[in-house]
Image: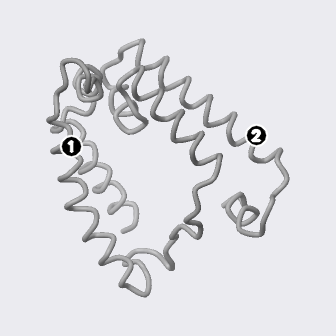
Amino acid sequence: MLMLASFLCGLVFGAGLLISQMVQPTKVLAFLDVFGAWDPSLAVVMIAALAVSVPGFMLAKGRSRPLLAAHGFWPTRDDIDRPLVAGSALFGIGWGLVGLCPGPAIESLATLSPDVFVFVLAMAGGMILHDVWQRARPAKSPDEALARRPG
């Protein structure tokens, strides 16, 4: 049942990316070009996403456990630290330069575009390097040690 639910969630997410045109880098770059030919239509997509996800998270938080899992995995930290800011900046720079973020990039592999393949390979390489770097660093707190635990 969990596999079916995961598949359906992925299908809805992918359909949303297609319908909203988030898989079109030119559309995303036009949204990010606030000082040029700005296209605000993706703001509607973001507002709609919040309108759906906020009530969903509120409902999920009110439950003692998820419907299809033994327990939930909620973030334990709420501080803003250097790795969070650096990661956000790298994400924003990549999104701004290319017009793709991870979800739309994976979906765009279906276009068989060499540029998309290079982007996804670079993204995967960055994720692997990040994991290697994280494993090499000593844990600073018990929360960090738990967060890095495999599994």
Considering only vertical position in the picture, is 119 above or below 3? above
- Amino acid under label 2? Trp
Considering only vertical position in the picture, is 78 above or below 31? below
- Amino acid under label 1? Ala
Residue for badge 1: 15
The residue sitting at 40% across, 74% down in the picture is 68
Residue located farthest toward the front when viewing the structure as drawn: 35
Of the two numbered discs 2 and 1 on the same chain, state the one appearing first in sequence: 1
| Front-most of residues 105 and 77 | 77
How would you rate the neighbour count of disc 2 (Cα within 10 Å): few for under 14, some for 14-19, many for 20 or more?
few
Considering only vertical position in the picture, is 104 above or below 60? above
Q: Give left or right: position of 136 versus 63.
A: right
Separation (CA) of disc 2 from disc 1? 34 Å
Image quarter (top left, top right, bottom left or bottom right) of the N terminus = bottom left
Q: Give left or right: position of 81 versus 103.
A: right
Q: Quadrant of residue 78?
A: bottom right
Task: Measuring from the top left, give residue 121's x and y in whole percent.
Answer: 54, 24
Q: Any mark on residue 133, and which? A: 2
Q: Give left or right: position of 112 versus 144.
A: left
Task: Measuring from the top left, give residue 51's x and y in whole percent.
Answer: 20, 61
